[in-house]
Structure formats: C-alpha cells, structure tokens
Image: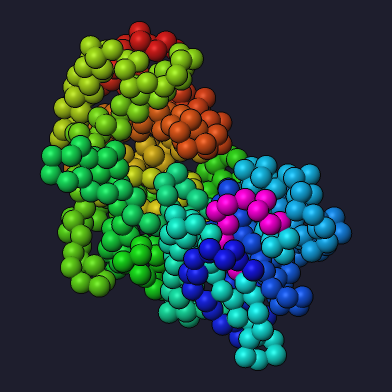
Amino acid sequence: MAPVSATELFSLDLVNEAATIRLAEDLAALLSAGDLIALSGNLGAGKSTFARALLRAFAANSALEVPSPTFTLVQTYDLPRLSVSHLDLYRLEDPEELLELGLDELVASGAALVEWPEKAGHLLPSGALFLTFSAGHDDDGRHVVFSADEAGTAARWGARLERTIAIRSLMHAAGWGQASRRYLIGDAAARTYERLHYDGASAIVMNAPPLYTLAAPGETPSYGEIVHRARTIAPFLALTTELRRRGYAAPEILAADEDRCLIVLEDLGTDTMVHDHAPIPERYEAAALLLADMHASAPWSETLPLPGGGSYTIPAYSRRALLTEADLFLDWYVPWRAGVPVSPDFVPADVREEYHALWHKALDDIAHAETGWVLRDYHSPNIIWREQRHGIDRLGLIDYQDCVIGPLAYDVSSLALDARVDMPHELERYLVDLYVTARRTVDTRFDPEPFHAAYAVTAAQRVAKILGLFIRLNLREGKPGYMAHLPRMAGYLDRALAHPVLADLNHWFHKRIGG
C-alpha cells in the first residue's frame, strides 16, 4: 500500500481484465526515464496483469514474454525507448536486500515497476506513483487508487495522468475507446504520436502540448515564437481542413481536444518515400508534381476558419525568422565543429554582423520570388506513399502545422535536398527541372530564373538551420541520432552555395568555416 503520508490523486473502477490492460497501456504511454510505479494489493488483485500489460505495451510487442520475477526478484527489459525493470519484492525478507538489487540505479538509468513495494520500507526511492489494487464490484473487476508520496511528485504525476486519461477519453469520442495504444514516434519538437489498433483497423493520436509560452509585452520571445513554430494544434486543424477541401490527402480529423492540444487522426499508412535508406525516384517525382500542382492552383488564403469557430492566420516567413533560424549555424554548429563548448559568445559580434549582412543581401535578391504556402518540412518523413491510390491522392501529407507564407521554392528545396536521405545530385536536378516544366506547362509566364535563385537561397538557409539544429538536438536534448545526417547536410550546403546568387555567402562560408 502507499505510505501513510501519500497524497491520493484519484481512483478508478476497472470493470474487467480488458479495462486493466487498457489502463496499463495508458500509463505505458507516459512512462519515461526516472519513473517508479509501485503496485500494491493482495495476491490476485491484478498487479501482475497490469505489469505484464504495461511492459508489452511499452515494448510494442503483445507477445513479449514477461515471466514473474517472484524468485529472481528483478527482471530488466532493455527496450528501444528505455530500459524498464520489473521487481517483485514478495519474497524479500529484509529491506536491506533491496540495496543489492540496485533499485536506485535502475530508476536512475531507466524506469521501474515494483510489486509489493511495502516490503522495501524506507529504502523505496522517493517520487513513486502508487497504484493500490483491490477487488471490484464484479468478480473480474478491480478498484485502483492512485497516490504519490510528495506534494511536488503528486502534482507532477497528476498532470501526466490527467493527460493520458484525457487521450483515452478522446479516443472514446472518436469511436476508438477500446483500441490498444502503441507509441509510434516523437519528433524533434515536443509532439509525440501513437498508433491505435482495434478490430483490424488503425488510427493515430497526436499529443502536442503547447510548444512555448507567448512572450509578455517587454519580454524577449522564445525561438519558437520568433520563427513561427505552431504553438498549439489550431494551425494543424485549420490547414488540414483547407488541404482536404482542395483535394489533398491530409488526414481526416476524427476527434480533437483543442484545450489540451490532442487529436485523433486518420492513419494514412506506413509506406514511405525511401527503400533501404535510398530515395525511390518515382515517388519523389510524384511529390515534386504535387508541389507544382499546389503552387499552380488559385491563390491560397492566408486566413483560414477553425472547425470549432474563429480563424487562424498563417504567419509570414519574416526576415527575423529566417535570420534567427540561420543563426543556429553560428550558435551550435560552428563551436561544435571547432571542438569547443557551445556558447552564444563564441562567434564574435562583427562576424555575426557580417553573416547577417550577407543573408540580408541574398534575401533581398529573391525578394520578388513567388510566394505562398510553405509547408516547411516537405520531405520523406512527412510524406506517406499510398500505392493503391491515384494522382495526388497517392501522397499522404502530415506534419505541416508550421506552415508559413514565404518563397514557394522553399518546399521544393526541402524535397530535393531531403535531410533524411542521400539525394544524388542528378536526382535533385531532375526533380527541380520536373517541377519547373510542370509549372511552365500550366503557366507559360512562370519564370525559371528567379525560381532557381530562390531555390538556392532557401536551400542554403534551410541547410544552415538544420546543421545547427541537429547539433542542438544532440547536445541539449540528448538526441544523438540526428548526428548521422551532418555529412549529408554539409554536402547539400556546398550544392546550394554554388549558385551565383550566393557567391558572397559561399566565399564567407569557405573563409570562415572551411570546406
């Protein structure tokens, strides 16, 4: 049972074993490093059922062998997302034996589920979430009480539990309340995604807590606010509605909770634009032609209605936003490449001013480039291939909530210089030429020359941003996987800088950075 001083958070009645399993999946969805979940209750109360279901859900493997650790006392699962240890202290004779199991270290490096936590006495690490199981009203029902042992811990657990239970409630509203939940992916922002499975079908949950707090008058805005990152789900809802209205394959919104920034979406599928880490040319061709179709169509509105009322205005890709993004190169990539600790003061002020002046000149040179919706991350992770569909419907679009009004060439460069896959120079040029030809077929007034200049400038700006961003994701957020993309991105930068419109910036990069 929970300590006498524990704060009760709430309780639930679980009508049957399936409800216990769903609760375990709801907690698996929030489990993270440093978490300790303590399971109390009599023999047969449902602790082991819960623990087994949570481990299988967290591993995304419903067939995972989860033996009872009654005799071994501890069983650790080294899973892709996190190591999770399952402890059963029923046979623990003395709390001091817990020291030999190294529970503190297990929690410090992963997460842990502990059955019979009362056997640990005062040696149970603080900060645990306690679940106390007892018999329910029906034979296979259960009653579970949630509590935490410290005020701060109670607030932290309470907020996380409220959110994961709200997701289950939204699933019910969408008709997916009985579905199983499996972690799908977390992106470079705070968003996470889950895939729901039920009766042979699937759907997607987008869990997108507000990305930042808007600056008060007189305060310096955050990076996200300056560069117009979507703070809530409102942009996604508005953009999705408009994309679908115009015939593009954005996911259907099955249910949304705007206050909590949660959405249940249509699952567009799992097929991608790549095979064995290489681009599939015909799929990239289709994606380039989709952009040409989108850019050649009638003007797209900058202000869009929201499904629940009100409107959303797509922000302009401001000069400040473009330069702030480009500064990630100076702030993160340059010191990392120099082998020194990252510091905003590493690059001297006069060098930064020179860098800004060159970007201003390059952006001035494309000031009259064609503008419109810039989806901003139009590349392989965000385009789903749907083999059985036809035309533009073959391409499912996701992750476009950061859309801005800017140079249309930006999305073409995002596709043709895909940050996640090696794009041969020949394929890049082919995709650009294919786009230009498609545009000129519809409108003979389309001028390739300013487009190519805008393509080079936006490509260089995007690559400079990403080089710095990947270093930041590694050093500040502990996501080293992005580092594998650095050599590719450095090569892309050389390609973009080769255009005459960037001659001065090309000289600066080679003089200051080398290459």
299 sits to left or right of 277: left
Q: Is residue 266 visible?
A: no
Instruction: Tell me where residue 494 sits by quadrant.
Output: top left
Q: Nearer the viewer, residue 109 or 473?
A: 109
Residue ranking furthest to the top: 511
Residue at x 20%, y 34% (from the top left corner): 320
The quarter of the rendered structure image containing the C terminus is top left
Q: Which residues are magenta?
A: 120-131
Q: How is the image coloured?
A: rainbow
Residue at x 74%, y 57% (from the top left corner): 87
Q: Nearer the viewer, residue 383 or 264?
A: 264
Residue at x 79%, y 44% (from the top left corner): 100
Residue 286 in the image: x percent, y percent? 44, 51
Q: How many marks?
A: 0
Residue 161 in the image: x percent, y percent? 48, 65
Residue 455 in the image: x percent, y percent? 31, 33
Residue at x 67%, y 84% (from the top left corner): 135
